Amino acid sequence: MIWINQIIQGVLLGGYYALIACGLSFMFSVMGIINIAHGSLAILAAFALFVLADQFGMSPFLALVIVVPAMAALGWALQRLVLERSARAGALVPILSTFGLAIVIDNLLFEQFGADTRSLAPYIGSFSYDSWSLTDDIDIGQLSMLIFAAAVILLGGLQLFLSRTPLGRAIRATAEDPDTVGLVGINARRVNATAAAIAMATVGLAGAALAMRATFDPYAGAPQLIFAFEAAVIGGAGSLWGTLIGGIVLGVAQNLGAQINPQGFFIAGHGVFLIILFARLFWGDRGAWFLKPLRRA
Amino acid sequence: MSLLAVAGLDVRHGLLQAVRGVSFEVERGETIALIGANGAGKTTLLRAIAGAHPSSGGRVSFSGAEVTHIPAHARVGRGIALVPEGRRLFAKMSVEENLLLARAAGRPGAWTVDAVMEAFPNLKARRHARAGTLSGGEQQATAIGRALMTNPELLMLDEVSLGLSPLAVDRVYASLRTLLSSGTTIVLVEQDLTRALRVAGRVICMLEGRIVLQGKAGDLTREEVTLAYFGLDKKNAAAAP
């Protein structure tokens, strides 16, 4: 029974990983940019929510109404001011510039908020630990369930948006051939800025999930980036449903590892990531056979 | 007033000047064939008119308004469409999606997905197939259809027969015939001289970035065109701007 519980909790944890990986995966698939500042931006959103809750007494859920659009606007500006310019200098330059951005964000947050560890849990009352009992041994946290549902809805919604709407089509076309979209009347700059705004809006949600379920401090961005990165790579970089599966694989592996040995949480997670990474390197997509049925034809 | 006016246009690829002081006008409803050897600057000229390549000097005016410095997507919005060399379809997207993309131009009109399917019947069965899986002829039809979906006033076709079997070329031109007779203004680049002289009302011949010969297709003999094409007609070459 304990193993079943670990798997269920692992799946729910995977939903959280998928939520933080969503923006990273979206940005990579659409714009070909690996955003090293991803984790730091999630922490920035978390601090924004914290300030609204702490200083202005807003419910963190209500504060999302302000923070998510603000993150979207930040994404637009980020694309226009940093990513677009650095991408012009070569594919690797955005990695450097977002790395620099991560350092700037981390240290500005540290200067403003200090090294204290914060959490949004105190501002959402008992919701942070309320749970439903399935059996005597298995409880499901309501917050974990909400985060999992948010990840599924977000990734599914984005997938639908990309495949069914005119803007989604324009985003995919721009990802495939940014030089040619102009000839069919698509403004590639605007499409990319919109895509960056969407990615950052999801980072706003990821920041909220992070801040409600655990604690954070100004330098908490890098570990978040690692989990997001692992989930995105396990799922096949750039595939949205794959990202959900990747998050779940990572979460389940970590929980099973922790059950075997208290030290096993990180080892099992990183181990699975490395095994899948090498399997991909040696056998290509066959190395990730379990994702095949999930890939869109 | 002419639909398209190009005046003293210079276009460069780095140090190479591909188009040198080219001037010509296109009247509404005309069909013009742009011919010339490889490297004469035809593709670069069309790309500069479409806004896909920046020009380094001169002016491009469309419907009386200067468009020299506006970006490609905005020119599509004004009614300039280019079917690029090599077709440049979005290979991962379906035929229908490729066509629907052109709606971004914001020019509703007679050309819809269904109208394109009528004009190019070979696409009907492939409507939901990925563009990357199409045959060359089907890809070319999709590329032309995608340009038509912007309901252009000026349609530029760059080497539609490139890489196609003779049979596929015949099919593409058969579909184009309705278009040619419908009054759409067309500038096309064509390597096949016989075909170019047959479909076009006027012929412009380029050599080394300059226009060396232009005139009504009916007034030019094949020999005159051939001499200009290879730069053997010294008198005309010297007189060109």
Image (tube, helix red, strand yellow):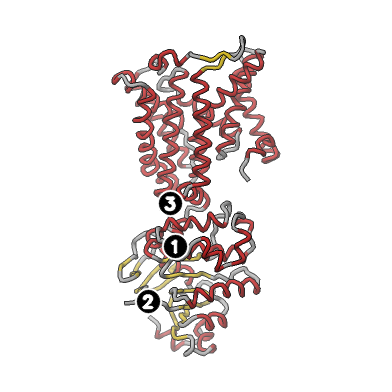
Could you tell me how far apart the alpha carbons at marks 2 and 1 are, in whole angstroms? 26 Å
Query: How far from the left and from the top, in percent, is residue A188?
Result: 43, 51
Spatial CA distance of label 1 from label 3 is 17 Å
Residue B136: name its quadrant.
bottom right
Q: Are marks 2 and 1 on the same chain?
A: yes
Of residues A57 and A182, the one nearer the viewer is A57
In the image, what residue type sits under mark 3?
Ala
Number of dots carrying numbers: 3
Is residue A265 visible to us here?
yes
Comparing A295 with A76, the one in front is A295
| Extreme residue toward the top, this view | A136
Classify residue B122 by image quadrant: bottom right
Q: Which residue is mark 2?
A: B23
- For label 2, the SS is strand
Q: Label 1 is found on which chain of the structure? A: B
Q: Which of pointers 2 and 1 indicates the residue nearer the eye?
A: 1
In terms of sequence position, does the residue under pointer 2 or pointer 1 come before the other?
A: 2
Give the x, y percent position of residue A61.
39, 24
**For residue A188, which numbered disc appears in the image?**
3
**Label number found at residue B182:** none
Q: Residues within 10 Å of mark 3 (few under 14, many from 20)?
A: many
**Residue B150 has which mark?**
1
Number of other residues with Cα within 10 Å of mark 1, as a class: few under 14, some 14 to 19, many 20 or more: many
- Residue extending furthest toward the left: A56
Q: Position of residue B94 (x, y in %)?
A: 57, 54
Which chain's residue wears label 2?
A: B
What kind of residue is marked 1?
Thr
Viewed as shown, does residue A252 lie left or right of A132?
right
